[in-house]
Image: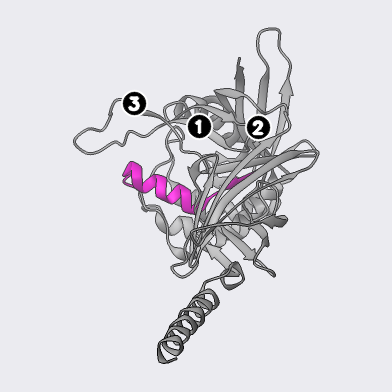
Amino acid sequence: MKNKFLILMILGIVFITSCSDDDDKDSPKDFNGIYSTTSTERVLDLRYSDAVFIGKSVDFNSADGKSATLKLQGVVPGESETVFSDVQLVENNSVYTFAAENKNDERTVALEGSIVKGKLTVDVDVKFVQNELMKKWKLSTVKMTWFPKDYYLVEGKLNTGGVATLLSLGGGMLLKQYLQDVAFLEDGNIVATYNAAVATDENPEPDADWRLSELNLAHYYVKDDICYVYPNVEMIMRQVEADKIGRSTGSDPMLSLLEQLLTGGIPVYFEITKGTKADAIYMYLNEVLLKSLKPLVPFIGGLVPGDYEVPILKVPMQPIIDNLPGALDVTTELKVGLKCNAIE
């Protein structure tokens, strides 16, 4: 009898312990919350087109432990939030994996990933419907118009019309030293071939170091014949640091203001001309956006050395910065942009 009682006690302890283990096991319901690429408690490992994507967040919520709702916040170009509902969770050794798709007339978003306590891994693939911009464009020149033309930025030397003329004539030659081409990809990425060479006192004219920019530095979304560009400040700063470019990256107040201005995307207007050999495009910013940037002028002025002269124009920069807010106030039309030819 004692032996039977002992066996029953042991079996009871094993049963209770196993039940306790099940109760203590983490469930997806315990993982609910917002995961961010900057968080140390709810870490987000986010990849877009199989490339690292930082500066974003994803809201994970599971009510029953078997399915979840995931909200991608600012991940898909043109969408402040992309929602995946009723995403089924598959458990394997305490790791819960998932896959889902969100599709509309403009794009298809495929999602897959996994979640464990403290970490959400998400891989996102996006494919947009073909549009006129979706190709590679080779830089041709810079084009600028500014009305009225007679507002002086440097008294007796340079007015708004003069700036537009000089930039249109020489800006393309200068820019070609740093930018070769720009491609608009089907996943919403903007990729450029740029020159990462940096001039130094020892080597003022270094050989060109042409590189392809990383994915996810900037995305785009076309709506109503306007291309909205979404620069990723965190990704760009990381690229600058990786290239070891010897320039100031700015400070937190400037980045904060830029983030506010860029939340809705930078509206870039474009005009495409069909050609017998290749299409041409003029992509430009207009006075509405440029006037909205006026609060940045004093801050930028503080970063420019007092004796700095503008290349090509050969005039001091400081008077231009001082007079620029007044010029923007009276501006009726201002377009500045790039003219490019399609690379077939």
Q: Nearer the viewer, mark 1 or mark 3?
A: 1
Q: Position of residue 236 (x, y in %)?
A: 46, 47
Which of these two is toward me, 57 or 308?
57
Which of these two is toward me, 43 or 141?
43
Q: Amino acid at mark 3?
A: Ala
Q: Is residue 309 above or below residue 339?
A: below
Q: Is residue 27 above or below residue 243?
A: below
| Secondary structure category for the residue under label 3 | loop
Residue tagged 1? 192
Real-space Cα separation, disc 2 to disc 3, in angstroms: 25 Å
Q: Earlier in the sequence, mark 1 or mark 2?
A: 1
Q: Position of residue 323 (x, y in %)?
A: 56, 53
Count of marks overlaid on the render: 3
Which of these two is toward me, 278 or 52?
52
Q: Residues within 10 Å of mark 2 (few under 14, many from 20)?
A: many
Residue tagged 2? 283
Q: Position of residue 176 (x, y in %)?
A: 46, 26
Q: Is residue 287 visible?
A: yes
Q: In terms of image quadrants, where is residue 281? A: top right
| Secondary structure category for the residue under label 1 | strand
Residue tagged 3? 208
Q: Amino acid at mark 1?
A: Ala
- Mark number displayed over residue 249: none
Q: Residues within 10 Å of mark 1 (few under 14, many from 20)?
A: many
